[in-house]
Each structure stands twice: as structure tokens, then as C-alpha cells.
Image: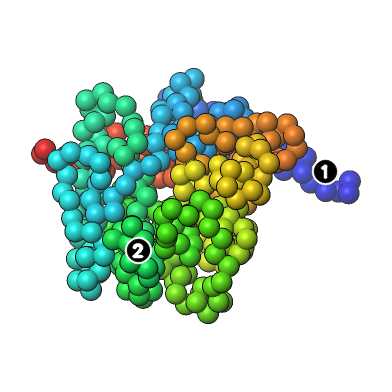
Amino acid sequence: MRANTIKKASQKVILLFAGVILSISSLAQGYDYPFQNPSLSFEERVKDLISRLTVEEKAALLCDQSDAIPRLGIEKFNWWSEALHGYANNDSVTVFPQPVGMAASFNDELVFDIFNATSDEGRAKYHQAQRRGEENRRFLSLSVWTPNVNIFRDPRWGRGQETYGEDPYLTSRMGVQVVKGLQGPEDAKYRKLLACAKHYTVHSGPEWSRHELNVNDVSPREFYETYMPAFKALVQDADVRQVMCAYHRLDDEPCCSNTRILQRILRDEWGYEHLVAADCGAITDFHTTHGISSTPVHAAATGLLAGTDLECIWDNYHYKMLPEALEKDLIKEEHIDSSLFRVLMGRFELGEMDDDAIVPWLRRRLQF
């Protein structure tokens, strides 16, 4: 026991010393803090930034409408944009056919070209708005919650057109090319956009019951051979940077608090290292419709501990109550830091924290 205490103390001293060295080096290069220094790795920069945040600031950054932190020069950031068949909800952009129509082409190379063009337009529209002094807002940001790789089996599902149909192999092939087109070359330092595999998992409607539905009649064979292949392909073959957990319960447990799919399968078996975002309102559902949590504070703690890093909701964020969950000993600060690390890595990978001159995607200019 004493040896472990000494070991942990030694590790803290080493980390503190390393942090001092990074700070001195960054100051010498003209940066106030190491996290601003682009010569450091993204991992080093994220860790430095996290070390400078209050618990309240950390919690706010785990919301899809992430607050600005003026004292550190961190700008407001929105995670919710769409690009299912073009950079949606913006004027003067190309509107491509619905994904189910793209799937009918059986041409995954064409699908790559479509989403490569979509990401060009997304970058151009975003930076055009910035040059005009417009605020980063929903549907005009660099994180796009695309593609929808759910399996479309029931024509009564009102969003089936967002998918690539009913075939797991075709959906996987199309989905991989969507992600590659949106995120840009994997060997590039900065991601073009951040794509998202949604809605994880076994989700294909109906819309009216999705906040209370319990799916508990899926056989293991159907689960692994029909509903999971596309998500696995996007994680392992396309290195998708976001996965969105669905609203409903799967075998009695809400998808966004389901450690079987979020931890054992997604992270342990598939090796996923990036962020998990909740579908909008899914954390609220824990105590309003699913009944697994008694309060918003408990719901926030439950989602975080299960591995849901980012909450999306229209207002009244439960994740802003994580400091209260910390006070109640429902979570530890290290749990907040783990999720925040994945969230901030996404922002650094976009170049959103860096000077425009060094991010090549910022030089994309289209005429509108």
C-alpha cells in the first residue's frame, strides 16, 4: 500500500516537472500556455488545457453548445451540424440525393466524391461566416453528425431515407467512404471535418416511441451480423471521430448508459478511442421516460460513467450538473477529465484552436 502511494506521488512529481518544462518552452516561443503551442502534440496540448480548467468549465465543455472561456482564449463551439446529403441548413450549398438513393448507385467511389465535396463546402461556409464576424452556431460548425448507418427495415420509419438501406455490407462500404470524404486524409495533421456514426445501435424507428422504447428481442446473430457491422467498419476501417448513442433501451439499458455496447464492444473489442455523443435529449430520458435515474444529477453521472462524453440537448444541460455529482461522490474528477480529453482532442484535430495560417483547410474558399 505504501509502495503504491510513493509510486503515485512520484508520478505526480514527474508530471508536474514535465508541465513546467512545457510551459517554459512555450513561453520562450511566444505562447502564454503550452496548449496554444502547435509544435506540441495534440495530447500534450489537451492535457495542459484540462489542467487549467475549473470543474464548472470542464462540465460546460462537455455540452454540444460548448461555452467560450475568455480567460484562456477558448471560443464557443457547437458540435451539432448535419451533412447527410450536403451541408444541411445552410444557404447556397449543394443538395445531393438522399443517402438511400446514393446506396442505389452501388458506387462507393462516387459517394466518397460527394462527401469530399460536402466537406469542402462545409469548411468554406464555416470560414466565410467567421470572416463576416458571425458566431459559431448550430448547423454551421466543423462537427457533422453524419452518416446514419442504421439498418432500414421498416418503411414506416420516417427517417429511413437517411440510411443506406437494409444491407449491412452495402451500408458498411458506403459509410466508410462517407467518413473518409468528410474527415479528409488520415495522414493529414488536421481533420477536415469530424464525422459521426449514428445511431448506435439497433435503431430503426419508430420515431414516436424512440424515447421510451425497449428493444429486447434481438438475437445475438442478428445483433452481430445485421446491426453492428457498419458501426464496426466505420470505427476500424475509417477511424470515425464520433459515435452517437441512440435514444432507446437495448435489453433494458438505455444505449447512452449501456456499458456493454459503449465499453466492452466499442472500446475494448473494437479499440475505439474517440468521443461518444448522446443523441439530443437522451441523457434527459434517463429520468423522464426510461426511469433509470431519479434526478438530472444522477442522470448526468450515469451517462458519464458509462462512457457518453458529450451531451446534446436544446437547453437545461444535465452535464452542467456534473460538479454537483462530484460533490455527491457519484463520480470522480478523473471521469470528467477522461471524457473531456476525448472531446477536446476533436477540437484540436480540427485546428480550431490554432492560427488560421497553419491550418490548410482554412484556405478552402468557394464562391457563393
* Three-letter code, disc 2: Arg
| Residue pointed to by mark 1 | 6
Q: Is residue 212 above or below residue 280?
A: below
Q: Secondary structure at mark 2?
A: loop
* Three-letter code, disc 1: Ile
Q: Nearer the viewer, mark 2 or mark 1?
A: 2
Quadrant in the picture for the C terminus: top left
Q: CA distance from mark 2 to mark 1?
A: 62 Å
Horizontally, residue 166 falls left or right of residue 203, namely left
| Residue pointed to by mark 2 | 156
Residue count near mark 2 (Cα–Cα under 10 Å), binned few <14, some 14–19, many ≥20? few
In percent of the image, x 17 and y 44: which residue is there? Answer: 93
In percent of the image, x 19 and y 53: which residue is there? Answer: 117
Which of the two residues, 102 or 287, is positioned nearer the viewer here?
A: 287
Residue 270 in sight here:
yes
Which of the two residues, 246 or 352, is positioned nearer the viewer here?
A: 246
**Residue contact between numbered discs 2 and 1, judged by CB atoms under 8 Å:** no
Q: Secondary structure at mark 1?
A: helix
Q: How many marks?
A: 2
In percent of the image, x 51 and y 51: which residue is there? Answer: 211
Which of the two residues, 229 or 283, is positioned nearer the viewer here?
A: 283
In percent of the image, x 42 and y 59: which residue is there? Answer: 206
Find residue 344 and report its horizontal and vertical position in percent. Answer: 48, 40
Residue count near mark 1 (Cα–Cα under 10 Å), binned few <14, some 14–19, many ≥20? few
Residue 189 in sight here:
no
Find residue 265 and report its horizontal and vertical position in percent. Answer: 57, 65
Q: Is residue 351 above or below residue 234?
A: above
Q: Is residue 235 above or below residue 360?
A: below
